Image: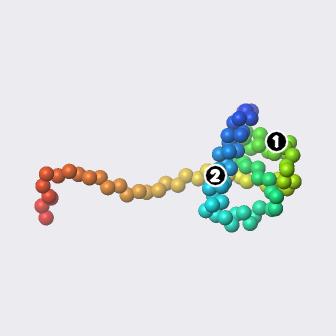
Amino acid sequence: MEKLTPQQVADKVLELTEQFNRYVFSNPDILDRLPDKAVLVFLDADDPAFNQANIELARATPSPADGPLVYVRMQKRIRVVQQEEWIPDILTSPIPA
């Protein structure tokens, strides 16, 4: 398994934090599932090297909140949105009826 640099781990944590925050804005009820003073440890469903590094980091870092570690596995979903597009056609005269 590839060893990630601290910068790679930090970048991924920031990315997942941002995505989690976006999700929370649309789905605030998810916060009801978190215990008080929870320390969130983000995991990427598709990146075991990152997960291992972030779990080790979370366990080694003392928590100022003194709350439980809560693991949040993030899964990337791609939504394909169909969009209508209008394309103009320039005519010299109207189309006959």
Marks 2, 1: nearer the viewer: 2
Label 2 crowd (10 A; few <14 / some 14-19 / many >=20): few
* Residue to which mark 1 is pinned: 56
Q: Give the side of residue 58 with respect to residue 97, left or right.
A: right
Give x and y (percent) for residue 10: 71, 40
List the single residue furthest toward the front. 64
Distance Cα–Cα, label 2 vs label 1? 22 Å
State the residue at coordinates (81%, 41%): 57
State the residue at coordinates (15%, 58%): 95
Q: Quadrant of residue 56?
A: top right
Query: Between residues 57 and 2, which one lies in front from this camera angle?
Result: 57
State the residue at coordinates (13%, 51%): 92
Q: Quadrant of residue 83?
A: bottom left
Label 1 secondary element: helix
* Residue to which mark 2 is pinned: 19
Q: Give the side of residue 17 with respect to residue 77, left or right.
A: right
Q: Amino acid at mark 1?
A: Glu
Q: Amino acid at mark 2?
A: Gln
Q: Can you see residue 45? A: no
- Image quadrant holding the N terminus, namely top right
Give x and y (percent) for residue 82: 43, 57
State the residue at coordinates (86%, 42%): 60
Label 2 secondary element: helix
Give x and y (percent) for residue 17: 68, 50
- Image quadrant holding the C terminus, namely bottom left
Give x and y (percent) for residue 16: 67, 48
Q: Quadrant of residue 59?
A: top right
**Sequence-first disc among 2 and 1:** 2
